Image (tube, coloured by chain):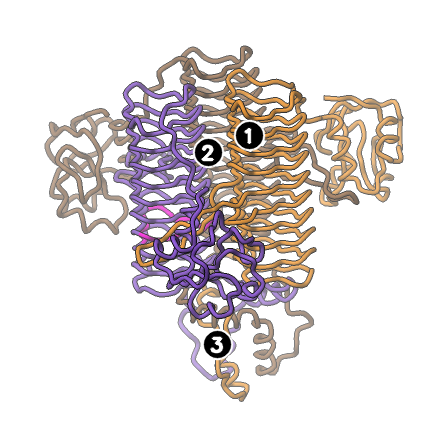
Chain colours: A purple, B orange, C brown
Amino acid sequence: MGTASLGELAVRFGCTLQGDPDVRITHVATLERADPQSLTFLANPRYRRYLGQTKAGAVVLDAQFAAECPVPALIAKNPYATYARIATLLHPPPPVTPGRHPTAVIDSTAVIDPTAAIGPLAVIGARTRIGTRCAIGPGCVVLDDVTIGADTRLVASVTLCSSVVIGERCVLNPGVVIGGDGFGFAPDADGLVKVPQIGGVRIGNDVEVGASTTIDRGTIEDTLIEDGVKLDNQIQIGHNVRIGAHTVVAGCTGISGSTTIGARCMIAGMVGIAGHLSICDDVVVTGRSFVNSSIRKPGYYSGGITVDESTRFRKNAARFHRLDELARQVRRLAGEAPEPDGGDDE
Amino acid sequence: MGTASLGELAVRFGCTLQGDPDVRITHVATLERADPQSLTFLANPRYRRYLGQTKAGAVVLDAQFAAECPVPALIAKNPYATYARIATLLHPPPPVTPGRHPTAVIDSTAVIDPTAAIGPLAVIGARTRIGTRCAIGPGCVVLDDVTIGADTRLVASVTLCSSVVIGERCVLNPGVVIGGDGFGFAPDADGLVKVPQIGGVRIGNDVEVGASTTIDRGTIEDTLIEDGVKLDNQIQIGHNVRIGAHTVVAGCTGISGSTTIGARCMIAGMVGIAGHLSICDDVVVTGRSFVNSSIRKPGYYSGGITVDESTRFRKNAARFHRLDELARQVRRLAGEAPEPDGGDDE
Amino acid sequence: MGTASLGELAVRFGCTLQGDPDVRITHVATLERADPQSLTFLANPRYRRYLGQTKAGAVVLDAQFAAECPVPALIAKNPYATYARIATLLHPPPPVTPGRHPTAVIDSTAVIDPTAAIGPLAVIGARTRIGTRCAIGPGCVVLDDVTIGADTRLVASVTLCSSVVIGERCVLNPGVVIGGDGFGFAPDADGLVKVPQIGGVRIGNDVEVGASTTIDRGTIEDTLIEDGVKLDNQIQIGHNVRIGAHTVVAGCTGISGSTTIGARCMIAGMVGIAGHLSICDDVVVTGRSFVNSSIRKPGYYSGGITVDESTRFRKNAARFHRLDELARQVRRLAGEAPEPDGGDDE
């Protein structure tokens, strides 16, 4: 944990300081529970009500709230990002102590930078290359022919299958599996014939992958996750998927095989995206949506029907199941001719 | 495996015995396949049809079914809970043999009760404390500064990140990850800035966590799971979530960050709950619901539209996508004035 | 990697060869990127546009496309399955090198065929039996009394709990957990009493299980996955479920406890199936459906409402939440008598 004065922070992070530059900060806290050694922030207006009572050493906030701040303030254009940067200074990731734990099992042909740390009971396969300052945590399994770029961290219990390539400065949380076989079977008279999954997975720089997210290897070519993509927990990414740079995907979402997602998209939680689709750049898909056709125009897309009190929901859902009939009845009442077909959703 | 006479069981579990108290029971079985050494039960009325033919040594059941039971009966007020208790007596969890497997990698600063069992190839980090009679199964990774209470069992391949606190008598199934980084990124001109996730996770007593469920650490304060909570498999719990005592959550459900769920709730399977919400005590949410606003009143809530034959479903779904238009047409037919706005679901 | 001439391939896989039988093939590729040493295929008509420009050594395709193929063609009745078989010949699974890695922890009572391979840091429990040519990859944990049939491969980081039985020629991808405790608790005055989960899991031959899929052990009898079942990633299968032979389940689907699914079904991705149901043979359930009643007739079933532009979706969804009222209004307009009840979806 670091420590810094408000004056130093204002200079370093380009904030306007309102208050004593010699106040020292040692850690971060919430507005509600901050003490005088802590830094906090106001970004979401719903927490504004806590500002007047805060006991923080300083608050990072937008200029519009500075007047009502009872303690020193660091006024920033983007308070949340500025808070994030200061918090990283005060609470840096654990340092990487170079070396190989004696219980790690490292193939003699692996090439491991001397500044990298290989934790207890990790496995490193043949011809695998681990870059400078990488941290491979306890219990990670990295199979053959994997490449991991500089400053990437596998927290613990991460599994990388053969021929996976990971960029620099990535963070892979526990339970992540990258490079498992894609789901490909060809139906035949005898049953299902497995289609060999011989492509790899390539992951760019500055990618974060949440706990127990799975990314399958490509069928022939590589599954591709571009720079700056952030993936939450328990996401499933099928074979041959491509995700463009700086796209963010929230937890429990599933992306089926051979779908391409553009750059700077925001895909919310528990979204299901069918296979072989194309989603363009700058698309936002809200929670629980089901995408089963391509999206060619940037914008907001939704599909999640929300919860209701059960009795009422069920009445409405029962009507849904007879909705085509209802619409036909309305046409008749309106004196319109019957349609040739009631339409199709897919 | 234990063994007991019906007389002993009736006394110990407060049942009325109908039949020979000297019949000995050695194991449990289903009504259909029970043999004379086995105990079975009738709780769900849909299985009543198997009662008349059962060859069990005894059946735990409600008084109303005693007359039709062809074998000895243990009559109980709550047959299912009584069955569960007797089954636990006959089939106790595997005993914990104290000691550290020689292949476990245990930091010299860890404090491990001498009655605890540390399995093969487990990792125990610095300053971690393991309580009395705990069982840490094979391949578990427990990082630094973790505390695990008495009689808690990590079955195998469980990962606990640093600063996680687990209570007493918990069971964590394989693949569970507790304390992975929460999903927090601040958008900025340069892309997304990672918000350090420096809170922990605190889990109460008597909590059960199913296979591959993930619980993220808090952003600043702790993610909190209270006493007696039962979590099924593949549940995702975001940072800063709080779940109240004795709440039950079924498989594949996702709970987004900073949401609070009350006590004694029942959340069914594959439910999606958005972030920053508050759900009060005693709420039941049925399967596949999407909760994206707070629930302030106990009761039953639903949101899952059920499957239909595909052709019919698609016709109705196509109508759904023109439902606002249909409603406007009905207003016109009814001679009502057009509404200023068609409403909004969120 | 193998190598073969087109003449050999035509004979071995029963194709009609159009072109030079002496052309040698060393690997597979996509139509777009194939070089003259590679084999490719045309199965999905959406990729037909790449056929005319391909530089492949040969293309596996249906007779109807042979005339427009600019390079040698292997004409097959089932081009995709034929491609899959040839690709397996050219890119066989990694060979199994018999032996036990010195860092594997193997109970002295385990029975391991001398042709099997036990990888680094794997754990094999008491009385567990591993069949001929099995490969147990790095970091796998196989607890006590497990049986694994011949030629089965646990890629890495797979966890099998006690008393699990796996058939022959299965592939289990990383993160798979089989035999975790089912989710069974009996409510009682004191809270929730755990119901011991003492059944096992039995998995047939030729079953494939995707990364991080979980299959719970049975409550009393076994959870059962029959021969030839293919399970994608992140599927959750509850206790006592039975899945019939050759059924295919796509990723992120959840199947609740005690449900039976027939043979040759195709269950798409992110489908939720409630508990205690019965689904007959030859049922297809499309993506994102919610099945909460039994299906007794083969056919296609759907339930996923698709995404729309957000403003429009929300207007329609708002109408959905008043659909019962709308339907009642239409009845009044039509001069029909009000219904006694608006219906119920469940």
Check disc 2 and report the residue beneath it: C175
Q: Residue at x 37, y 60 (%)?
A: A15
- Do marks 2 and 1 share a subunit? no
Query: Chain under label 1?
Result: B
In the displayed structure image, the side of residue A311 where residue B20 appears, left or right = right
Q: Residue at x 62, y 62 (%)?
A: B295
Which residue type carries mark 1?
Arg
Determine if residue A278 is in view.
no
Q: CA distance from mark 2 to mark 3?
A: 48 Å
Question: Which residue occupies the foreground of this view, C65 or C185?
Answer: C185
Which residue type carries mark 3?
Leu
Question: Which residue occupies the foreground of this view, A76 or B264?
Answer: A76
Rendering coords of residue B293 (x, y %): 56, 63
- Which of discs 2 and 3 lies nearer the camera? The answer is 2
Determine if residue A299 is in view.
yes
Check disc 1 and report the residue beneath it: B127
Check disc 3 and report the residue beneath it: B326
Question: Which residue occupies the foreground of this view, B284 or A165?
Answer: A165
Q: CA distance from mark 3 to mark 1?
A: 65 Å
